[in-house]
Image (tube, rainbow, N blue to C red):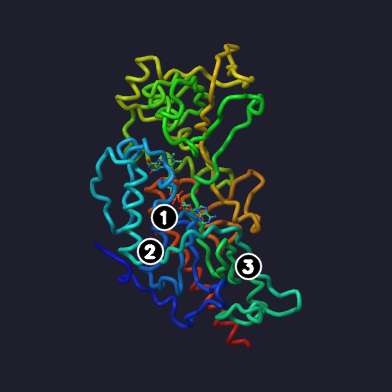
């Protein structure tokens, strides 16, 4: 098993260890935001390339415990009901009990990984915003005069977008870093689509984000909206739990018998990359992969449970009206309508393109060389996130080399 150390580079040479300016402001080389698969993989690879935990790199995570988004997944989502969980680097998952909740399996696995490789995860810390350190304080002081230690006191360097540091403001103090790896996933941005009547419907409405157990909805007529794996699983669970589920999808469900193989993986990746490298928001996972048809899903279709009523047209006080004009009495709506990338903390950097997405080149944000985005677009799976973490570490180290040589050049000129 490999671990941090053997791939050490000389990138830190010449950089003095930097300390917290005071109890709440810290200076590091790299801040990783999020300790899910993408953030943990990034931190592991950064340490392997020579960065010291806490001194050079820190991982800030909003969760109270290890597990990333998996920590919040509903208890009935057992490990065998999840898609494959790819290994974190250098640390095989092994063969967990397939009937154990995925949330517990992943909490244990990520926690063991963090301990094994001494990853500098600080939690719970929620990043509120990331922004450039201003070139000058209102009274004309430079950032170094404002207390940002370990930084060349040269305003020309500080004005250079590619090397000036970024300030990461959190619920537990401030970090200043040369590079930010953003790995915040999607779980914190549940997507609630707008439908006419959503505000006058008098029954319960909940999202996948808030779903805990089908038993909570026992005996109710539940409209499940969405065409992804979560919706399919909710339909079957609700039926088993004695609810009366009704399914609405915008398009006919796209079940596929194609086994997931590397070639298909590459096709999916290329399709997602085509959007993000054009500055468009990533498409939903299911629109690219379709739904893998399992025996359980086939049985659900044969039993008449997994049959879509087609698109929802509107909600009324206690009914759902479908696009074909039919109407059903409903007690609750379960919005299994997916998630969007949780990127509000990057808003001050104005990264969005007119198309609504972020223009990406691999893990690089084209507009902002100091920010690397992992777990976004084609890397929004445990496999993609693990790989993106490695790419981000390589890119971050290159970025640090550039900023170090820039600083040295500035120092020589001074
Ligand atoms: C319902 C569902 C099921 C899925 N099932 C699978 C599956 O079976 N297999 C698979 O490969 N993929 C699956 N995915 C895809 C999922 O995206 C990946 O599994 C992967 O775990 C995501 O890893 P991540 O590190 O990008 O994000 P996450 O696991 O979401 O981790 C992000 C972390 O960042 C933290 N964070 C967020 N915002 C902030 C902030 N502002 N400040 C500080 N911390 C923050 C969060 O607390 C969290 O710990 C599923 C996704 C969903 C929504």
Look at the numbered disc 1 and give the secondary structure of its residue. Answer: loop
What is the quadrant of the N terminus in the image?
bottom left
Q: Residues within 10 Å of mark 1 (few under 14, many from 20)?
A: some
Where residue 286 appears, x then y in whole percent? 45, 33
Please name which of the two marks, 2 or 3, marks the residue nearer to the observer. Answer: 2
Of residues 280 and 130, the one nearer the viewer is 130
Please name which of the two marks, 1 or 3, marks the residue nearer to the observer. Answer: 1
Estimate the spatial distance between the alpha carbons at disc 2 and disc 1, rounded to whole Å: 21 Å
First of labels 1, 3 by sequence position: 1
At 50% from the left edge and 72% from the top edge, which residue is drawn? Answer: 28
According to the picture, the residue beneath numbered tag 3 turns out to be 161
Estimate the spatial distance between the alpha carbons at disc 2 and disc 3, rounded to whole Å: 25 Å
Q: Is residue 377 left or right of residue 136?
A: left
Check the image and name the residue furthest to the right.
139
Where residue 47 appears, x then y in whole percent? 38, 68
Look at the numbered disc 3 and give the secondary structure of its residue. Answer: loop
First of labels 2, 3 by sequence position: 2
According to the picture, the residue beneath numbered tag 1 turns out to be 65
Does the beta carbon at disc 2 come under 8 Å from ligand 1? no
Estimate the spatial distance between the alpha carbons at disc 1 and disc 3, rounded to whole Å: 35 Å
According to the picture, the residue beneath numbered tag 2 turns out to be 45
């Amino acid at each position: 098993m490999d671990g941090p150390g053997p791939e050490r580079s000389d990138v830190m040479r010449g950089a003095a260890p930097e300390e917290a300016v005071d109890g709440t402001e810290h200076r590091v080389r790299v801040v990783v935001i999020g300790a899910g698969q993408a953030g943990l993989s990034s931190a592991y690879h950064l340490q392997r390339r020579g960065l010291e935990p806490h001194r050079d790199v820190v991982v800030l995570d909003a969760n109270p415990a290890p597990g990333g988004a998996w920590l919040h997944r509903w208890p009935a989502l057992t490990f065998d009901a999840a898609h494959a969980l790819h290994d974190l680097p250098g640390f095989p998952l092994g063969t967990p009990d397939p009937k154990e909740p995925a949330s517990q399996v992943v909490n244990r696995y990520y926690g063991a990984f963090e301990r094994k490789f001494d990853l500098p995860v600080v939690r719970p810390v929620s990043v509120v915003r990331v922004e450039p350190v201003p070139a000058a304080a209102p009274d004309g002081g430079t950032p170094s005069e404002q207390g940002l230690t370990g930084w060349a006191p040269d305003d020309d360097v500080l004005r250079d977008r590619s090397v000036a540091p970024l300030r990461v403001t959190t619920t537990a103090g401030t970090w200043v870093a040369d590079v930010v790896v953003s790995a915040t996933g999607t779980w914190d941005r549940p997507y609630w689509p707008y439908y006419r009547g959503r505000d006058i419907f008098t029954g319960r409405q909940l999202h996948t984000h808030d779903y805990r157990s089908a038993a909570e909805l026992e005996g109710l007529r539940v409209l499940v909206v969405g065409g992804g794996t979560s919706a399919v699983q909710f339909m079957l669970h609700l039926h088993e739990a004695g609810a009366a589920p009704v399914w609405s999808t915008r398009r006919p469900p796209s079940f596929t018998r194609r086994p997931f193989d590397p070639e298909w993986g590459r096709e999916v990746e290329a399709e997602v990359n085509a959007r993000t490298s054009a500055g468009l928001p990533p498409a939903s996972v299911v629109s690219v992969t379709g739904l893998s048809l399992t025996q359980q899903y086939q049985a659900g279709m044969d039993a008449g449970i997994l049959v879509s009523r087609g698109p929802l047209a509107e909600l009324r006080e206690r009914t759902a009206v479908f696009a074909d004009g039919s109407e059903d009495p409903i007690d609750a709506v379960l919005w299994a309508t997916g998630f969007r990338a949780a990127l509000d903390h990057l808003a001050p950097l104005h990264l969005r393109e007119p198309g609504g997405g972020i223009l990406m080149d691999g893990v690089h944000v084209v507009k902002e060389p100091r920010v690397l985005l992992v777990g976004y677009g084609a890397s929004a799976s445990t496999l993609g996130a693990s790989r993106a973490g490695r790419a981000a570490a390589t890119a971050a180290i290159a970025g640090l080399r550039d900023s170090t040589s820039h600083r040295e050049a500035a120092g020589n000129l001074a």
